[in-house]
Amino acid sequence: MHIVVCIKQVPDSSQIRVHPVTNTIMRQGVPAVVNPYDLFALEEALRLKDTYGAQVTVLCMGPPPAEAALRKAISFGADDAILVTDRAFAGSDTLATSFALASAIGQIGRNMAVDLVFCGKQTIDGDTAQVGPGIAKRLDLQLLTYVSQVDRVDTERREIVVQRRAEGGVQVLQTRLPCLITMLEGTNEMRFASQAGMFRAARHPVRVWDKAAAGIEDVAKIGLKGSPTVVSKVFAPQPKASKAEQIKCESNAPKDLAVTLIAKLFTQHPALESAISAGTTGSI
Amino acid sequence: MTEAKAPAKRAGRKVELDPRLAAYQGVWVFVEHERGQAHSVSWELMGEGRKLADQLGVPLSGVVMGAPGEDTRRFCHEAFRYGADRCYLMEDPVLADYRNQPFTQGLTELVNAHQPEILLLGATTLGRDLAGSVATTLQTGLTADCTELNIDPENRSLAASRPTFGGSLLCTILTLNYRPQMATVRPRVMPMASYDESRSGPIIEQPLHLIETDIVTKVLDYIPDNRQDRPQLPFADIIVSGGRGLKSPENFQLVWDLARVLGAEVGASRPVVQAGWVELDRQVGQSGKTVRPKLYIAAGISGAVQHRVGMEGADVIIAINNDPNAPIFDFATYGIVGNALQVLPALTEAFRQHLAVARKAG
C-alpha cells in the first residue's frame, strides 16, 4: 500500500504580519511548525503502515525552509519526503494549491500507484478545509472528510471502512481505494520520534521538486493567476459605537451592584426575565 | 475596433466582468438537512442572502437536495417563508444520506444549468465537504467561514470578510473573474431570517441521472450523537462564561452556580479550556463555538478578538472584569468593574431572590 500524506508548514504564533501593499501574509521571522491538524493525518498513516505495511510518502508545498516540516515527518516514521517549491506558486489560493498538490501526487503515482491520500482537517493559518476536497476532486478520488477512525482496510478487495463525523452523529462509510481522507483532530496521539528516526531524518535526502518536476505545464493554473480569490483588504475589527454601561452604586458592594444590575437588566430588557423564568423549572 | 482605455482603479486587476460570466445571476442558498431536519444555518444564510439579493436586485433561491418524500417539499416551503423567491429541488433516492459524490455532481449540475452569481453554504461538516468539492469542479473561488457578506458597489461582486490568522485581524476576499462566487458561513454567526408564513414561490425541479451502482461510497451505519451528553452551547438562550480571571479551576464552580440558577449553559474562554478546567465543547470563540444567546455573562474574560467573534452576536452582554480597560467593556452592554470572585456569588444570590419573588407573584 502506498500512502501520501500532505502536510503544511505554518507559522507557530498568532503574531500576524501582513504585507502593507500586497495584503499577503509575511512569513519571515515567525517560527514555523508542522500544521498541528496534519499530525493526526500522519499518525493515522503510520498506524496503517504498522498494521498493514505501507510506504508512507510525505508531501509539502511551500518555500524552501518547509523542508524542516518534512524532516520532522521522516523522524516520526515516514519513508520518503517531497518538497514542491517554486516561486511561481506564490499567492496561490486553495484552488491553485490543490491543483499543484494534485499534480505532484500524480507524479508520485507514476513510480508507485497511490492508494490513500491523507490530509489534516484544515490548517491553522488558512482555516479553510478546502485543499483536501480540492485534491480529491482533481484526482477523482473518493473523498472522506472529518474521519475520526479508520475501522479497516481490505487491501485485497481494495476497500476501506471509516467513521466520519457528521453534524448530528457519526457516519460509517465504506469506499474503494484509492481515496482521500481528511483526519479529524484529537483522534489519535502522535508518536514520539525515536532516536534512530531522528538520525534518519537528518540524513534523508528530501526530494525538491519545482513546478516542472511536479508535472505542472499550465502556469495559468498556479500562483496568483490560478487563484480566483483575491484579498482586497485586511483590517482590524470595528470598535462598537457605544461602550458598556458601567453599573455603579453608592456602596459599590458586590451585593448592591448585583441588585442594581438585575433591576436595570429586567427594566431595559423585559423579555429576558420571561426567558430566564422559562428556562428554570422547579425549585431554585 | 476601438480601444477605449478605462482608468485602471486597481493596477493589473481586471474589473470588467467577462460577458460569459455576466449571464450568472441570482443568489443561492444551499438548504442543508439531515435526518428530517433542516440545519438552522440554512435560515441564517437565507436572511443574509435576502440582503445580498436585494442589493443586487436579483432573486434569492433555495437549493434543496434529498431523497423523494415529504421532507424535501417541506424544506422548500420553509425556504420561501424564510425569504427565498424560488427553490431548486433535486430529488433522487441516492441523495438519501449525504455522500460527497452524488451531492457534488448534483449541485454542480444545478449551478451549470441555472448559473447563479453567488452560492452560499453553511460551514458545517457537510457544507465544507460539499463547498470545497463543488468549487473545484466548477473551478471558482470559495471563501470559508465568513463573518460578514456585502456587495462591493464598485464591481457588484461579493465582498466576503473573515477572520485571518487566529482571529487577530479580518480580511475581505473577492472572487472577481469567476462565477459563481462561493462562500461558507459558520452556524450562529448570522441572525435567523424573519419568518413569514404567507410567503410562497415556485419550485423548479431537476433530476439527477445517477443510480446507486454508480456511487462508490456506501453508508453502512449512522450513529446519532447522544444529545443529552453534550453541551448545546450554540443554541443556548443564556450562557454564563468564565475566563482566566477566575484564577483557579475550583473558582470556576462560581460560574456553574450562576448558570444553574439561570438555567443557563456554561461557556469558557480559550485559556481556561486549554488549562483543562472545562471540556473542549464549552469553548466560545473563533476556534470554539459561535453563540448567539439572549444573554451572555462573561466573568473574568478580557474579550480578545478570538473570543469576541464567537459571542458578540449575543443580544445582551454582561461583563465582569477587574480591569476597567479590558477590551470586553468596548462591546458589552453592561459592565461591572470588580472582582469576579465576589461579584459572581452576589449575582447568583440576587438572581435567585429576584426569580423566587417573580415566581410567587406570577
Image (spheres, coloured by chain):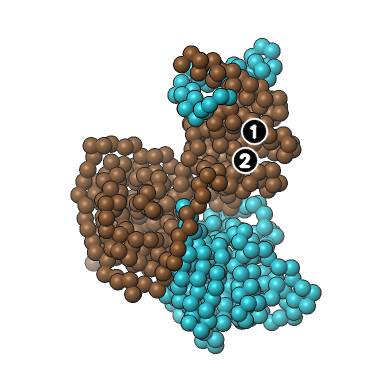
Chain colours: A cyan, B brown
| Element marked by disc 1 | helix
Give the class, few, some or many, for how many residues have Cα within 10 Å of label 1's Cα (few <14, many ≥20). Answer: many
Residue furthest top as drawn: A250
Q: Residue at x 58, y 57 (%)?
A: A125
Q: Which mark is residue A226?
A: none
- Please tell me which residue is depicted at 44% across the width and 67% down the height of the picture: B220
Q: Contact (CB < 8 A) between labels 2 and 1?
A: yes
* Residue at the limit of the structure toward the left, as seen here: B202
- Label 2: how many Cα within 10 Å (few below 14, some 14–19, many 20+): many
Secondary structure under the numbered disc 2 in the rendered image: strand
The mark nearer the N terminus, 2 or 1, is 1
Image: A243 above or below B172? above
Viewer can see residue A165: yes
Looking at the image, which is closer to me, A88 or A163?
A: A163
Q: Position of residue A274 (x, y in %)?
A: 46, 24
Percent of width and height locating residue B328: 60, 33
Q: CA distance from mark 2 to mark 1?
A: 9 Å
Q: Which residue is mark 1?
A: B255
Q: Quadrant of the N terminus of chain B?
A: bottom left
Give the farthest residue toward the front: A282
Q: Nearer the viewer, residue A75 or A69?
A: A75
Q: In the image, what residue type sits under mark 2?
A: Ala
Q: In the rendered image, which residue does mark 2 sit on?
A: B268
**Which kind of residue does numbered mark 1 sit on?**
Val
Tell me the quarter of the picture where residue A236 sits.
top right
Task: Identify the subunit bearing mark 2.
Answer: B
Question: Residue A93, image x and y in percent?
Answer: 49, 63
> What is the quadrant of residue B337 in the picture?
top right
Q: Is residue B282 above or below residue A202?
A: above
**Viewer-proximal residue among B62 and B69:** B69
